[in-house]
Image (tube, rainbow, N blue to C red):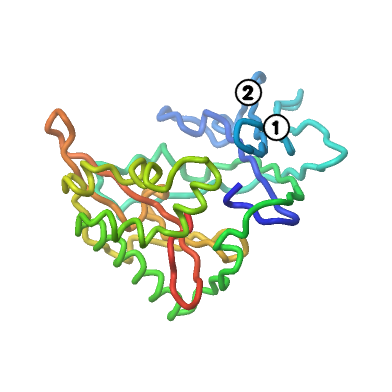
Amino acid sequence: MMLMANGENEISLEIGALGWFSDKPASMEERGRFFPKAGCSLDLVRFIKQEETLLSSIKVTINQQGIPEARPDSVHPVIRKEILAEQAEPGFIDPDYFDETYFPKGMKVYQFTQKVTVTGLPEWAWTRATPYTGSDEQLRKLKAAYTEMASIISSRDRARLKAYNKEALKAWSATTGDSEDDILLSLFSKDNVEGGKARMQPIRWDDYAVRVMNGGRMVQLYNKSKPIYSPLTYRFTDESGEERMGYYAPVFSLIDGQFIPVT
């Protein structure tokens, strides 16, 4: 719910055929073929303490023509369209962490979108944000926000980290019912922060592109080779002594002239 605002919202579900992820030679048509029993569903549920209410649902199955289709909904009509899945390209991350089958080149997915009206939500910080336009000044401020957050993590100062993530923690707490301290600990463990296990990596800005959400009021940078990664990438040594890579991927909003994390 923290990504939704009071009034009309859109929820979306995307489904792609498993053949796209195979490392075996195959034509584009073969990769895009769905198994007859494939399916997917998305439920929009409001949680208030121990009570939950189903607000809307998208349920997708495969029809006789082998194409995904949504169950008809007269209250909340579902719109289907075929789109290009998020793409990745080599060269922007350590080759050991690049997998061309994770974000397959040319992969098509079916997107199902539904409009839903909700009420009674808190006024999340992002709802009053200035939309991201891609100006040089805004991009400079966004980069500065990532740089500051990386510095705070490296400082091992949990109090500063909590203060910097104030709005995000407030939203997570209102959504989950957990305390802000517990949420902060789940996102940034003591081993990683106070223990210094997470070694933040230098940011190479050319490795990242901008992802814009919610009408420009939410934004983040993502790695062009591994789109789930952000500039807040770190290395750590696991229990077996192997070096690994991890990341933090907050979403930012431009509020009162500065980008702040809101998730």
Residue at image mark 2: 38
Q: Nearer the viewer, residue 76 or 63?
A: 76
* Three-letter amino acid code at the position of disc 1: Pro
Q: Nearer the viewer, residue 220 or 263?
A: 263
Q: Residues within 10 Å of mark 2 (few under 14, many from 20)?
A: some
Q: Residue furthest left?
A: 241
Residue shown at 12%/32% (left/top)? Answer: 241
Instruction: Indicate the position of residue 58 as horizontal and vertical percent values.
Output: 71, 35
- Residue 224 appears left or right of 233: right
* Three-letter amino acid code at the position of disc 2: Ala
Q: Secondary structure at mark 1?
A: strand
Q: Rounded to the nearest whole Å, what is the CA distance between mark 2 and mark 1?
A: 9 Å
Q: Nearer the viewer, residue 118 or 104?
A: 118
The image quarter containing residue 200 is bottom left
State which tag comes first along the sequence, 2 or 1.
2
Residue shown at 66%/31% (left/top)? Answer: 51
The image quarter containing residue 142 is bottom left
Instruction: Indicate the position of residue 226 as horizontal and vertical percent values.
Output: 37, 48
Residue at image mark 1: 68
Instruction: Indicate the position of residue 193 as horizontal and vertical percent values.
Output: 23, 49
Q: Secondary structure at mark 2?
A: loop
Instruction: Indicate the position of residue 232 as horizontal and vertical percent values.
Output: 31, 55
Classify 68 as above or below 232.
above
Q: Residues within 10 Å of mark 1 (few under 14, many from 20)?
A: many
